[in-house]
Image (cartoon, rainbow, N blue to C red):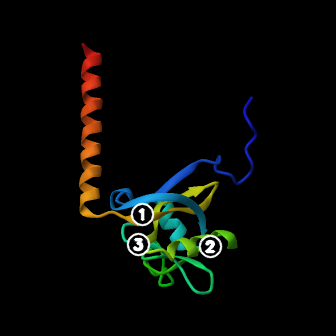
């Protein structure tokens, strides 16, 4: 028997609006967190259309104990008016105080940053997934690419063997 849907719900599914595909290539990603976003109406409409970029974005914890999404690019709403939003404005993240304190402590370490990985809608609300990341150097990136190629070759060989 199917569960009754709540009125105004989108079924509880997740709709991805933007992803940072280079994050796992440029960083070793550890703990992942989910935060709500404070957005303007035109930003929500643009994101629902699948536009937006996290390529140069990062998360900042300021001295007042607030978390901010910096340099995320959400283009202006094409049907908006002169009151449209600024595409790269800082956006406040909604986190519990204990999470913010923990993140501020972790970011205090050398070479640690908070890297946005995904921006999505969950149950109709905009959410940001970000991870604690440590930067990779060139050798680490080469090693990761070599592992990925080796895995792809193994998968290809197993697939070929299954055809015979």
In what element is the residue under mark 3? loop
Mark 3 or mark 2: which comes first in sequence? 2
Residue 69 rendering spot, x and y as whole percentages: 50, 74
**Is 132 rendered above or below residue 13?**
below
Q: Nearer the viewer, mark 1 or mark 3?
A: 3
Cβ atoms under marks 1 and 3 closer than 8 Å = no
Q: Residues within 10 Å of mark 1 (few under 14, many from 20)?
A: some
Circles 3 and 2: CB atoms closer than 8 Å = no
User: Label for residue 111?
Assistant: 3
Give the SS element for disc 1: loop
The quarter of the picture where the C terminus appears is top left
Q: Earlier in the sequence, mark 2 or mark 1?
A: 1
Mark 3: few, some, or many residues within 10 Å (few <14, many ≥20)? few
Say which of marks 3 and 2 sits in front: 3
From what the image shows, is residue 89 above or below residue 130? below
Q: In 3D space, how far apart are the residues under numbered discs 2 and 1 (Cα atoms)? A: 28 Å
The answer to whether residue 19 of the structure is visible from this angle is no
């Amino acid at each position: 028997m199917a569960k009754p849907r709540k009125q105004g719900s989108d079924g509880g599914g997740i709709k991805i609006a933007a992803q940072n595909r280079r994050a796992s290539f440029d960083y070793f990603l550890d703990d992942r967190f989910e935060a709500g976003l404070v957005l303007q109406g035109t930003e929500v409409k643009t994101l629902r259309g699948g536009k937006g970029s996290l390529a140069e974005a990062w998360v900042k914890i300021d001295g007042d104990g607030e978390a901010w999404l910096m340099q995320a690019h959400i283009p202006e709403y094409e049907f908006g008016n002169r009151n449209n939003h600024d595409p790269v404005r800082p956006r406040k993240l909604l986190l519990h105080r204990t999470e913010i304190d923990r993140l501020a402590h972790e970011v205090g370490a050398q070479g640690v940053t908070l890297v946005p990985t995904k921006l999505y809608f969950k149950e109709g609300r905009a959410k940001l997934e970000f991870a604690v990341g440590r930067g990779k150097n060139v050798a680490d990136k080469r090693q990761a690419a070599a592992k990925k190629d080796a895995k792809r070759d193994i998968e290809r060989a197993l697939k070929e063997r299954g055809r015979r």
